[in-house]
Amino acid sequence: MKLSIAIGCLILSLGFVLICSFLNLGVFFNQLLGVVFLFCSLFMGYLGFVNLFDYLNHSRLLNKGVKVKAHIIEIKRGLLGENHLPDYIVEVFYKHPNTEKIYYTEFEYFGDVNANEILKKGKDVDILIDPQNPENIYYKNVI
């Protein structure tokens, strides 16, 4: 999804630049319109690159992430009634396999914790950690 959003934003950015090239910039209205199109182009280009780098970072984490066991400390309920917010926030700690340093972090869980036997306080779950930034973790709902 993020890749398609990134590609769409970058194509839209190029489209705005292409529209600006057809404007007659001798007319004041066309100059204002050109400035608006250039600002839209820069904004869409920015959004495109942000989504592209986010997608690349996520795919790198899935491909090169280190799988570790994390111990669940607490499960907090998220805000209800909001579709884009997580249902639960799960606080965990884990030991980095290379440095033996202990990290405390949290991840978002979309779904019912009561129906999931794996997500209980005091149990261990499998997570992927980023080798470059150990605080960046990934947890899939289906293990």
Image: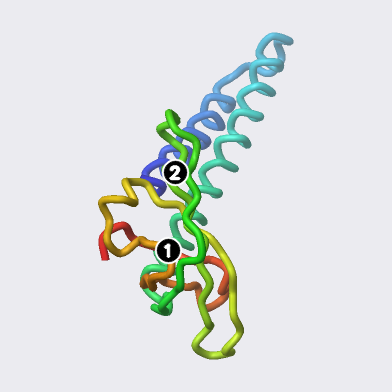
Mark 1 — residue?
A: 121
- Is 71 rendered above or below residue 1? below
Rendered location of residue 105, percent (x, y):
56, 65
Rendered location of residue 135, percent (x, y):
58, 69
- Is 102 rendered above or below residue 6? below
Instruction: Name the residue located 63 percent from the left edge and 36 percent from the top edge.
Output: 42
User: What quarter of the picture does the N terminus occupy?
Assistant: top left
Q: Quadrant of residue 33?
A: top right
User: What quarter of the picture does the C terminus occupy?
Assistant: bottom left
Q: CA distance from mark 2 to mark 1?
A: 18 Å
Colouring convention used in this rendered image of the protein: rainbow
Instruction: Name the residue located 37 percent from the left edge and 44 percent from the top edge.
Output: 4
Left or right of 82 in this view: 22: right
Q: Quadrant of residue 39?
A: top right
Mark 1: amino acid: Lys
- For the image shown, how many numbered marks are present on the structure? 2
Mark 2 lies on a secondary structure that is loop
Mark 2: amino acid: Pro
Instruction: Name the residue located 45 percent from the left edge and 73 percent from the top edge.
Output: 70
Observer-nearest residue: 10 or 92? 92
Instruction: Name the residue located 53 percent from the left edge and 72 percent from the top edge.
Output: 93
**Which one is earlier in the sequence, the residue at label 2 or at label 1?**
2
Mark 1 lies on a secondary structure that is loop
Which of discs 2 and 1 lies nearer the camera? The answer is: 1
Rendered location of residue 64, percent (x, y):
41, 76
Mark identifier at residue 86? 2
Rendered location of residue 107, percent (x, y):
48, 57
- Is 131 rendered above or below residue 122? below
Observer-nearest residue: 3 or 42? 3
Tag 2 and tag 1, C-beta contact below 8 Å: no
